[in-house]
Amino acid sequence: MTARSEMLIQESKLGLKTLTIKIKRYDPEKNRFRTSIYRMEVSRYDTVLDVLLKIVRTNDHTLSVRYSCRMGICGSCGMTINGKPRLACMTNAISLGEKIEIEPLRNFPPVKDLVVDLEPLFHKHKQVKPWLIRKDFEEQFNPKKEYLQKPEEVDRYRIFSMCIKCGICMAACPTVASNPRFLGPQPLSQAYRWIADSRDEGGLVRLEIVDSQDGVFGCHFAGACSASCPKNVDPALAIQFLRRLVMRR
Amino acid sequence: MEVLKYDLLILGSGLAGLRAAIQAAIVSKEKIRIAVISKLHAMRSHSVAAEGGIAGVLYPEATGDSLDLHAYDTVKGSDFLADQDVVELFVRFAPEELKFLDHLGVPWSRTPDGRIAQRMFGGMSIPRTAYAADKTGFFIMSTLYDNVLRFENIDIYHEHMATSLIMENGYVKGFTVLDLKEGVLKVFLGKASIIATGGAARIYGFTTVSSSVTGDGAAMSYRAGIPLKDMEFMQFHPTGIVPSGILITEAARGEGGYLINRSGERFMSRYAPQRMEVAPRDIVARAIVREIQEGRGFIHEESGLGYVHLDLRHLGEEKINTRLPFIRELSKKLINVDPVHEPIPVRPTAHYTMGGIHADTYGHIMFNSTDYVPNLWGAGEAVATSLHGANRLGSNSLAECVVWGRFTGESAARYAENASSSLLEVSSTVEEIFKREEKRLFDQMFKPELNAEDPYIIRQELWRTMDTYVYVFRDEKGLLEAGRIVRDLKDRFSRVRVDDKSRKYNMNLKEVIELGNMLDIAEVVIVSALARTESRGAHYRTDYPKRDDVNWLKHTLAYYTPEGPRLDYIPVRITRWKPEERKY
Ligand SMILES: Cc1cc2nc3c(=O)[nH]c(=O)nc-3n(C[C@H](O)[C@H](O)[C@H](O)COP(=O)(O)OP(=O)(O)OC[C@H]3O[C@@H](n4cnc5c(N)ncnc54)[C@H](O)[C@@H]3O)c2cc1C
Ligand code: SF4
Ligand code: FES
């Protein structure tokens, strides 16, 4: 947390603050965006998701927001908040200042209000075969013993296994914005997650899939994915590792 | 009317639903067509929130653990309301499932020699809870979801919400399902179906569970004539963060965290001197509420809620970072408290639904103690196979989901392979139910009378009622009051309005449908709790503080009637462990 947000939380310790919330929302019936503005009283613990749900409850029942766990783990509530893609449930409201501007996640087709269509992401994710590929098919589905894996072997892929499929890295990625066929940071980091797992034997199959201009070679290393990922997955690092593996192949 | 036909329908994509889908695909050799239907994006199911771990006896030689000991802990934890044949089956298959998950790629926390690490959990007498840091549910969910993608015979329907169950001549034909993205109602027909829609703790306001946990599957089954079992047993987790209710995993105490009152005292020594903070949840939850009631807690400035402290400081930064990183992240982000330096404010929070749709040992759903719905199964928190009885032990639930996911996936797939295709015919019943649902959802709710009711006010009132009268301690007066209020809310709900008139992703409509389900479930919880004049496990009646095995060693079944639930009772199956007093 930045020093500034720390300070604001301190300031507000004794009470509520009134903020202006500006929401750019998509109207599917008219196929266009419009803006709604609300003034809301916010307490020091309220997240942006809390504020949105308070608007829905008390102010505007027609606003649609996708959410579920409200604890940063289900990946539902990605949206653009003051210009940056973030999880609404993990973003403290008061720390953003007097005015909050909210828009749907970029680089995905809007469905309604703040809800976007993530199917393109799920589809690309599936393309990299994100499951444990083994030759011992019988043992895999009828296990007799665990596959041993040392803690340091887990460490090799752990950060990449944290991905909650929220799409935030895809929304931040300039290459995804200009080339819709580019697999993008989420699927590529997942390709690496499975390759790096010592239990997996599908490395070559996956390297084949990512070895193209729409795969690892589409990436310009802008690093926006890693900077914005709420789970510190570091897709840019995964893509670098992948590229190295592809070149060595 | 759009009709989709499958051999097998799986409603719900949490741990239970996804595990069922994989097993059905494996045993049918990828031949039968399977639909997984989820009102969320499938991978966002509430199971991702599970933190602490999953139970199973893995290394008996090394730890001195045994299947019998796991079974005994579970039966004792259940306050002897578990069906013991179910428990024995469970402990036998749980270790298999942990290995299965390993073989799909779960990033377990490991011991130095590469085996699966296990930790201590409440009510378990030995460390037998396998874990993946403190995001066990998330890691298992994402591994199962990713593995479902490898099977070409499984179709996933994201953001498709079932609104009713289609019953005909005692068979389930399928479901009416609202496609949230498009805003159209569809019919799914299946030769066999599995309900895995999760629990119902969202009938409470102060709760750990995701917004999706609204008891839909249970409410739909109930309205279709299937009884709900043991719904008075709602688990309160001792440590919900104040003011949101979000969970601090039991692993925090399993790793050595203390509960402290206002005078700095580790008060568990008064309530469970031997097990202290790792006593079962019902006992710890009552201890915390007592401390608060007797003036030894703190009061939260903004919410006015009473609380105690969960102190992890003595564990040190390194242990907190490796074993409980998510807990640190959550409390820092949500309440600006770093557990390395400050204790976390906590109080009991609604967490788990021990009751559910009435099912037999293998998850086959039943009308009563003898008659089955021939082609319907259920798995996970939505159903009560009677594994948990009156109080579930932490980490038994994830294991339950995968064990019964496997059983039901297998049974339902075998049934579907041999079932008659007449089950997939669009009969007049199907058409009628579809028309009734369309009218209910789109006509009645969208075109309400003047002075129609605001659903969000009704929901707020429901939450306040449950949080006040149907919490850790209950009594007759409070339950009667709660019953009166909820009946009134149901009456108001019949005049509810949906303000949003758009079809696509109409969250307002979705939340109204969920509210209808929550009201039905809340009424069952209250009526079942009022009838049970004893204290057992999570159900504690201050006016009947003793367990009463003579009159109440039995399961409650609640049947739908237009006037409210009708109750019936069936015996508990006791095999090896005779009821004894529960001491920790
Ligand atoms: C914060 C937290 C931590 C926990 N930690 C642990 C732990 O460490 N160990 C443990 O053993 N247990 C734990 N539990 C309990 C455990 O997580 C749950 O009991 C378990 O995940 C339930 O899984 P499920 O598959 O039955 O349901 P869920 O995961 O809730 O899935 C329900 C599914 O049904 C779908 N659904 C619901 N209604 C409809 C409808 N109308 N139409 C279509 N789809 C629908 C949802 O979309 C979802 O896919 C925890 C619970 C919480 C709240
Ligand atoms: S890599 Fe990070 S930002 Fe991208 S989808 Fe996964 S969790 Fe979200
Ligand atoms: S609501 Fe689940 S990540 Fe925000």
Image (cartoon, rainbow, N blue to C red):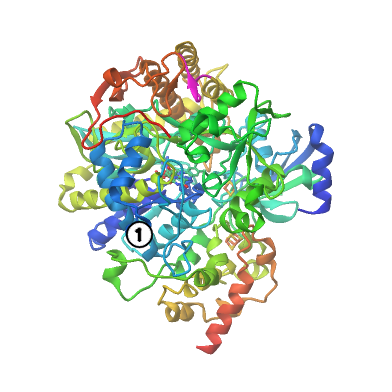
Q: Could you tell whether B421 is left or right of B177 in the image?
A: left
Residue B29 horizontal/vertical position (percent): 23, 63
The residue where tag 1 is placed is B59
Between B437 and B121, the residue placed more toward the observer is B121
| Residue B470 painted magenta | yes
Disc count in the image?
A: 1
Q: Which quarter of the rendered picture does the C terminus of chain B lie within? A: top left
Q: Residue at x 53, y 23 (%)?
A: B462
Q: Could you tell whether B259 is left or right of B485 in the image?
A: right
Q: Could you tell whether B370 is left or right of B483 in the image?
A: left
Ligand 1's quadrant is top left
At mark 1, the secondary structure is loop
Residue B137 horizontal/vertical position (percent): 47, 51
The chain identifier of the residue carrying mark 1 reads: B
Taking B102 as reference, is B307 above or below it? Answer: above
Res B233 seen here: yes
Q: Residue at x 27, y 51 (%)?
A: B92
Q: Residue at x 41, y 77 (%)?
A: A202
What's the residue type where badge 1 is placed? Tyr
Q: Which quarter of the rendered picture does the N terminus of chain B lie within? A: top left
Res A32 seen here: no
Between A99 and B564, the residue placed more toward the observer is B564
Q: Which residues are magenta?
A: B469-475
Taking A91 as reference, is B513 above or below it? Answer: above
Between B119 and A9, the residue placed more toward the observer is B119
Q: Could you tell whether B183 is left or right of A138 in the image?
A: right
